Image (cartoon, rainbow, N blue to C red):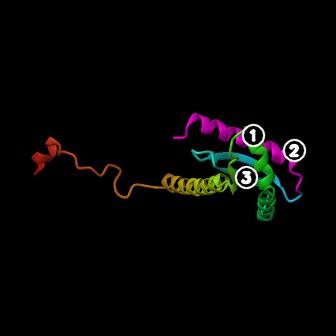
Amino acid sequence: MASPRVLKLADQIKVIVAEMLERRIKDPRLGFITVTDVSLTGDTREATVFYTVYGDDEEQALTAVALASATGLIRSQVGKQLGLKFAPTLAFIPDAVPKTARQIEDLLAVAKSGDAAVAEQAAKAAFAGEEDPYRKPREADEDSAD
């Protein structure tokens, strides 16, 4: 578990990076980007910034190139604003949560359609034999007939 100081620094880095991308970085390749999370190592030397981009694969690739070119400027600003002795290195990683959520939604839709098919089949079902297939004890009048 990370220390409270590291978690606080990670939150501050997330805010600083988001503000930099919104206000200072004017790269036309930069798409509609959202910083989702920041993971910081215990020694605060390396920060991994997770982001999502709204758009197709081409826009995501262009945004990755724009982030790679702006990493130095963003890192220097993070170091200045946090006042750390060593500014953490930044690595921008596309967040996999939206893709995973989409896969889960697709699987749930398949399961729901399967459940609907089973429910439809169960509604049309009939007993295979008699209505009450269990043996019952013989009545007294049946014994006297034998």
Q: Amino acid at mark 1?
A: Val
- Give the image location of residue 66, x and y in percent: 81, 59
- Disc 1 versus disc 2: distance between alpha carbons? 12 Å
Q: Main secondary structure of the magenta part?
A: helix
Indicate yes or no whether the magenta region holds residue 75: no
Q: Secondary structure at mark 1?
A: helix
The quadrant where residue 8 appears? top right
The spot of residue 123 in percent (x, y) is: 51, 52
In the rendered structure, the answer to whether residue 44 lies left or right of residue 133 reads: right
Q: Nearer the viewer, residue 129 or 58?
A: 58
Callout 3: few (<14), some (14-19), or many (20+) C-alpha neighbours within 10 Å?
many
Amino acid under disc 3: Thr
- Rendered view: 65 above or below 90: below
Give the vertical position of 78 relative to 96 (above or below): above
Q: Which residue is mark 3?
A: 52
| Frontmost residue, 70 versus 54 | 70
Residue segment shown in magenta: 1-27
Looking at the image, which is closer to me, 125 or 80? 80
State the CA–CA distance, disc 3 to disc 2.
18 Å
The image shows residue 9 at horizontal and vertical percentages of 66, 38
Q: Is residue 30 or residue 106 the one in the foreground?
A: 30
Q: Quick one: label 1 or label 2, which is nearer the N terminus?
A: 1
Q: Which mark is residue 23?
A: 2
Q: Secondary structure at mark 2?
A: helix
Residue 126 located left or right of residue 7? left
Residue that mark 1 sits on: 15
Q: Residue at x 34, y 57 (%)?
A: 129
Between the residue at mark 3 and the residue at mark 1, the CA separation in whole angstroms equals 15 Å
**Callouts 3 and 1 close, C-beta under 8 Å:** no
